[in-house]
Amino acid sequence: MEQNSTKINKISLSQSYQREIFGLGEVYEIMSVERLRKKLLKKHSYGTLYLASNQQHNNRGVVLEELAKQLAGQNYSILAKGFVDSPPWRSAPLEKEIKKSYNKLIIAAAKIIFYLLIKIEFLWQGRKKSHMVFGLVKKQ
């Protein structure tokens, strides 16, 4: 599903979220989306998770309400919607998709720190801070 060149990722709740890693920001994104997916899986045994860039964060992507309207217009029943991938630091979009190589020790340390940050992510999560919007749906 694409609208105005906005990429909307679609994954089943039973499927892990994966994406190409260019830096530590993508590691945080994967961990944040995986935490959300597991949380939703506990509440809803099945469904399809739609993820898109949050337009209110970086002027690219869609607004949460637009995503919900788009999904509802396709005969989906919306089970949950909201924001995800909200790092506490300021971030800028990638200028070029260049992979950075990090020492495995740095990545392991970052994962530990990110795990703790993601546990309290709800404290600063919102329209302006979150990088992504999501909608969990099932067919009507």
Image (spheres, rainbow, N blue to C red):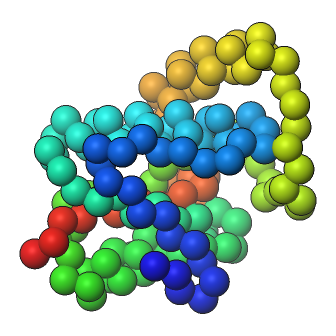
Whether residue 54 appears in this view of the structure is no
The answer to which quarter of the image holds residue 67 is bottom left
Residue that protrudes farthest toward the left in the picture:
140
x, y percent for residue 74: 26, 85
Left or right side of 46 for 89: right
Q: State the residue at coordinates (31%, 78%).
A: 71
Q: Quadrant of the C terminus?
A: bottom left
The answer to whether 22 is drawn above or below residue 115 in the figure is below
Frontmost residue, 125 versus 27 = 27
The answer to whether 56 is drawn above or below residue 87 in the figure is below
The answer to which quarter of the image holds residue 81 is bottom left
Whether residue 84 appears in this view of the structure is yes
Left or right side of 131 for 49: left
Q: State the residue at coordinates (60%, 88%).
A: 4
Q: State the residue at coordinates (24%, 64%).
A: 137
Left or right side of 38 for 53: right
Left or right side of 41 for 121: right
x, y percent for residue 90: 76, 45
Frontmost residue, 71 versus 48 = 48
How many marks are shown on the rendered structure?
0
The answer to whether 47 is drawn above or below residue 37 in the figure is below
Frontmost residue, 15 versus 42 = 15
Q: State the residue at coordinates (36%, 83%).
A: 70
The answer to whether 29 is drawn above or below residue 11 in the figure is above
x, y percent for residue 119: 45, 25
